[in-house]
């Protein structure tokens, strides 16, 4: 029997409508739709990805718990923002390293919105000590770093993205041949997918293959920060 898709067009319909009705009254009135069309399909995807993830790394976590697992909360943190809209208009999951406690830990990522769907690998906004470990690893093991990002699987799948310094960070040679990578503040690879991909029955396999192509990059990062792959 063919496998049913995890996600349907109803997910995108809900998120588009939420974008135009981003208030608590509307969300409360449509909470059952959120559970049925958005939250529960993503939680099922996370649960089904778990055994596939274990074959890639036993140290990355896929947790389908609805409030403290791999899925990001739909509620926005408005405490330090001028934007007081209470809800995100996208949903996402992060399969972070067991040693990490937040979104800044190394891991795999899935982002879903009506405008874009993409997979991510790496570390976004690492703290200062972690950032320096990665920079040191690049400076000292340049050949290994280049192999991790220039291999056919990674290069054909991912694009390195994220913020970077304009000048060489303190303590690093501005003339180092890899200084542009050392100046990075994020170490993330992004692979564009599509809304059409998401609603296919084989999306779980497609996502698994995509993030698996990030394995050399992830191995470099986890080794650099001192956690097992």
Image (spheres, rainbow, N blue to C red):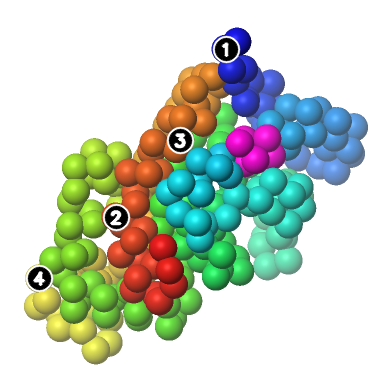
Q: Which mark is residue 207?
A: 3
In magenta stretch: residue 104 = no
Badge 4 local density, few (<14 within 10 Å), some, or many (20+)? few
- Furthest toward the bottom, the residue is 171
Q: Quadrant of the N terminus?
A: top right
Q: Which residue is mark 4?
A: 177
Badge 1 local density, few (<14 within 10 Å), some, or many (20+)? few
Question: What span is in magenta?
Answer: 42-48
Q: For the point 58% across and 44% down, which residue is it?
A: 50
Viewer-closest of 87 and 194: 194
Q: Which mark is residue 216?
A: 2
How many marks do you count on the picture? Answer: 4
Q: In the rendered view, does 195 fall on the left or right side of 209?
A: right
Q: For the point 23% across and 57% down, which residue is it?
A: 148
Give the quadrant of residue 211. Answer: top left
> Residue 196, relative to residue 134: is it above or below?
above
Give the quadrant of residue 206. Answer: top left
In magenta stretch: residue 43 = yes
Query: Does the residue at mark 3 contact the one at mark 2 (Cβ under 8 Å)?
Result: no
């Amino acid at each position: 029997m063919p496998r049913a898709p995890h996600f349907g067009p109803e997910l995108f319909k809900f998120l588009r409508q939420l974008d135009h009705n981003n208030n608590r009254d509307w969300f409360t009135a449509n909470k059952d739709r959120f559970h049925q069309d958005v939250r529960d399909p993503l939680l099922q995807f996370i649960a089904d990805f778990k055994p596939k993830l274990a074959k890639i790394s036993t140290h990355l976590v896929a947790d389908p718990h609805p409030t403290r697992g791999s899925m990001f909360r739909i509620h926005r943190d408005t405490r330090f923002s001028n934007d007081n809209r209470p809800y995100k208009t996208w949903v996402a999951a992060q399969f972070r390293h067991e040693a990490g406690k937040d979104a800044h830990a190394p891991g795999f990522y899935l982002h879903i919105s009506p405008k874009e769907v993409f997979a991510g690998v790496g570390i976004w906004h690492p703290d200062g000590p972690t950032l320096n470990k990665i920079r040191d690893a690049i400076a000292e093991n340049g050949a290994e770093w280049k192999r991790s990002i220039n291999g056919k699987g990674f290069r054909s799948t991912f694009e390195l993205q994220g913020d970077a310094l304009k000048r060489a960070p303190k303590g690093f040679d501005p003339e180092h041949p890899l200084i542009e990578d050392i100046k990075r503040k994020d170490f993330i690879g992004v692979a564009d997918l599509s809304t059409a991909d998401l609603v296919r029955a084989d999306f779980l396999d497609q996502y698994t293959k995509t993030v698996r192509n990030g394995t050399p990059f992830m191995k470099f990062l986890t080794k650099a920060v001192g956690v097992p792959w």
